[in-house]
Amino acid sequence: MRRVLILLLVLAPAWTHAVDPADREAGLRAGAERRFADAYRLLRPYALANPDDLEARLAASFAGLEIGRLPQVDELLTGLSDDLPPVRLLRGRLRFEQGEPDAAIGLLEPLRGRVPAPMARDLETLLADAYLTVGRADDAATLLEPRRDESLDIAMLYAQARYQAGDAATAATALANRADRALATTPPANATERDSLGVLLRAYGRYRLAEGRAEAALPALERACDLRPTDPQAWQLRGQTLAVLGRRDDATAALETFRRLSTSQPSELETGAAIEAAAADPTGAVIDDAKALAEAGDVDGAIRMLEEEEALAPDDVRVTVAMGEILARAGRREALDALIARYEASGDQERVALLRGLVD
């Protein structure tokens, strides 16, 4: 999506009524460098104060989408015309991430053939994802077919589309080269890379099993479990594959691990509800996570999390109250007094009063 950000900045002219030009330029630079939290923190206030600055509004919206600030992005895009392709693309992504795939499709389909090639790649990937969500797997696969080898993300999405369309063999083939390379090399040490490879190998194993090639599925699923040892789906598929191969004892052990992990983790319904809640109220979700972290004993980590959130949502007094509550419960009176003093120095009497209410 980085190319989309750059294109947004090229295609959208800027009419600037400066409040703080330094923040504007720093925010645009942060976005181009993929420091999206910094970009959003700098650009959103500027864009709201300068609504005619289309460049700033689009860049702030893009950064907000990257960090999950959906209600704020909706606000930033309000009043902008869908006749502008960058606006329509951003609003289409927003609707999709808000759980409205049909609305996203309605916004995105008219853009096909109307945007530059780099933007078309991201448009088609997003549109394919929306097609899959509403059960149009054949349309998604057809759309992604010319791009299926461009990146891991597109290959995974294309394979999923073929699988959902009932063609497990083509789905597996789409991932085969990447899976073979992953199996032939030493697992990476980087946690993010390990997780990404684990997801790839789990998908490849699933498709090979569905194709009827359990012997080809097993090595991929064994490695997926090594890379993602708490992934219940990987263990379930491993157990099912072992059962097909007649290895009953090993299958039983793998499925027991699956059952244990499944009961200790949130259900898909609970996870989905949490994702929806975070999309509707990202600040509230961060506050809940910070409180849970503090309850687990990491008060300093919780306060750091809330300080970062305060930078992104400076007008939300809930963050201030949450910091005060955590410090009060932890008996950190000196830290709480310092927090109060900070707001007193800035003249924010509302926050001072809220925090004093916790200690008086």
Image (spheres, rainbow, N blue to C red):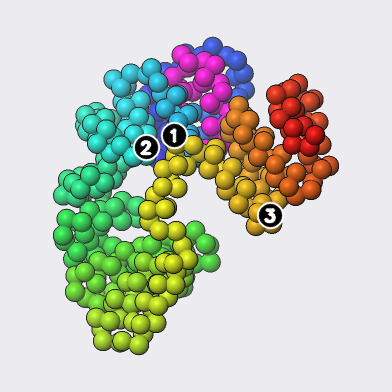
Q: Which mark is drawn over residue 98? A: 2
Q: Amino acid at mark 3?
A: Asp
Q: Secondary structure at mark 1?
A: helix
* Residue 206 part of the magenta segment: no
- Which secondary structure is most common in the magenta stretch? helix
- The residue drawn where x is 17% and y is 55% is 165
Label 3 belongs to which residue?
A: 298
> Residue 354, relative to residue 255: is it above or below?
above
Q: Residue furthest top?
A: 17
Label 1 belongs to which residue?
A: 70
Q: Are marks 1 and 2 in contact (CB under 8 Å)?
A: yes
* Apparent side of residue 125 relative to residue 49 in the rendered image (left or right): left
Distance of mark 1 from mark 2, alpha carbons? 7 Å
Q: Amino acid at mark 2?
A: Gln
- The residue drawn where x is 53% and y is 43% is 285
Q: Secondary structure at mark 3?
A: loop
Q: Residue furthest right?
A: 334
Q: In terms of depth relative to the viewer, which is nearer, 31 or 244?
A: 244
Residue 275 picture location, percent across and down: 43, 46
Q: Which mark is drawn over residue 239? A: none
Q: In terms of depth relative to the viewer, which is nearer, 186 or 75?
A: 75
Residue 60 picture location, percent across and down: 49, 28
Location of residue 24 by image quarter: top right
Identify the mark nearer the N-term, 3 or 1. Answer: 1
Magenta-tinted stretch: 34-59
Identify the mark nearer the N-term, 1 or 2. Answer: 1
Q: Secondary structure at mark 2?
A: loop
